Amino acid sequence: MKTIFTVFFLICMYKTPVSAQWTQSDGPYGGSAVCFAVSEANLYAGTEHGGVFLSTNNGASWTAVNNGLTNKKVYSMAVSGKNVFAGTYGGGVFLSTDNGTS
């Protein structure tokens, strides 16, 4: 019985196609992405030196949304409705009330 189970298991393993689940994105400009936040179709990335970036197409392209952000070392992010919070290294927490526009 153990032999039959082993053979069945091996057949199932080899018949199941294995495909990649990940696709590399160029990522946001301005340094490596340290943190992410998501709100509906908006994906925000905080970077070490470039501030906050926004993607509306699942990471295919990125736009800097740093108007009023005086510290661009963003290490944590959170989103609540249209409010985007960016926690910075040594500069406190910044709030955008318009999806990161300002």
Image: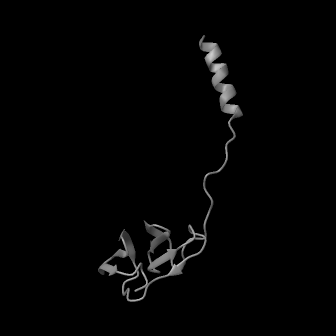
Q: Residue at x 35, y 81 (%)?
A: 97
Q: Residue at x 44, y 75 (%)?
A: 48
* Residue 88 in view here: no
Residue 25 vs 93, above or below: the answer is: above
Q: Residue at x 41, y 78 (%)?
A: 99
Q: Choose top left, top right, bottom left or bottom right for residue 7.
A: top right
Residue 14 lies, in percent from the top left, at 70, 32
Q: Nearer the viewer, residue 10 or 42?
A: 42
Residue 42 lies, in percent from the top left, at 48, 71
Residue 97 vs 22, above or below: the answer is: below
* Residue 98 in view here: yes
Q: Is residue 9 left or right of residue 97?
A: right
Residue 20 lies, in percent from the top left, at 65, 50
Q: Residue at x 42, y 80 (%)?
A: 100
Q: Choose top left, top right, bottom left or bottom right for residue 24.
A: bottom right
Residue 37 lies, in percent from the top left, at 42, 67
